[in-house]
Amino acid sequence: MPERQARDAVVAVPLYKLKAEFFKTLGHPARIRVLELLSEREHAVAEMLPEVGIEPAHLSQQLAVLRHAGLVTTRREGTTVFYSCVSEHVARLVTDAVHNAEHREPGVPAHHRTDPGVVALPTAAEGSR
């Protein structure tokens, strides 16, 4: 009986609130940088330190946030802890965010430079001339 009461007491969280929590988790530059690194391959914590550029204690805090949110997973090899993205969806989201940011810069974004059919669009200032 107590099990059923516990199940009935669980209130479903609307999907839009879960999405908002997800994006809040991404709201720190160090977490974004960590996910960028992990979208390429698995990394040991020591490998990420110089790339992320924050103190070890701060990196540990940011990794804990990502772990708690279910975006990264760990494995231990001896005394070394390795982190990786939990799925290709997380890696793809980070890649898409980078691509979106590249579109804010003038010229052809880096992710389009290998496509010969893509040309730079005029900026708002150039288009109004």
Image (tube, grey):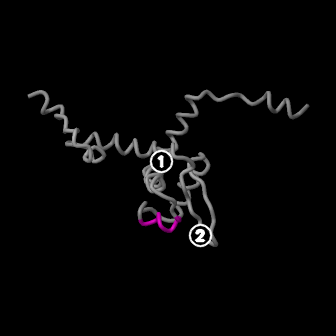
Dot 2 falls on a residue whose secondary structure is: strand
**Which kind of residue does numbered mark 2 sit on?**
Thr
- Which part of the image, by quadrant, shows the C terminus? top left
Amino acid type indicated by mark 1: Ala
Tell how many labels: 2
Q: Please report the residue visible at 57 percent of the width from the left and 49 percent of the height from the top.
A: 86
Q: Is residue 93 left or right of residue 2?
A: left
* Residue to which mark 1 is pinned: 91
Q: Residue furthest bottom?
A: 78
- Let me know if residue 40 is in the magenta part: no
Residue highlighted by disc 2: 80
Q: Counting other residues with Cα less than 10 Å from the Cα at mark 1, is it few (<14), some (14-19), or many (20 or more)?
A: many
Name the residue at 60% across, 46% down: 70
Q: Which residues lie in the magenta part? A: 44-50
Q: Which one is closest to the eye, mark 1 or mark 2?
A: 1
Q: Residue at x 86, y 34 (%)?
A: 3
Question: Callout 1: helix, strand or loop?
Answer: helix
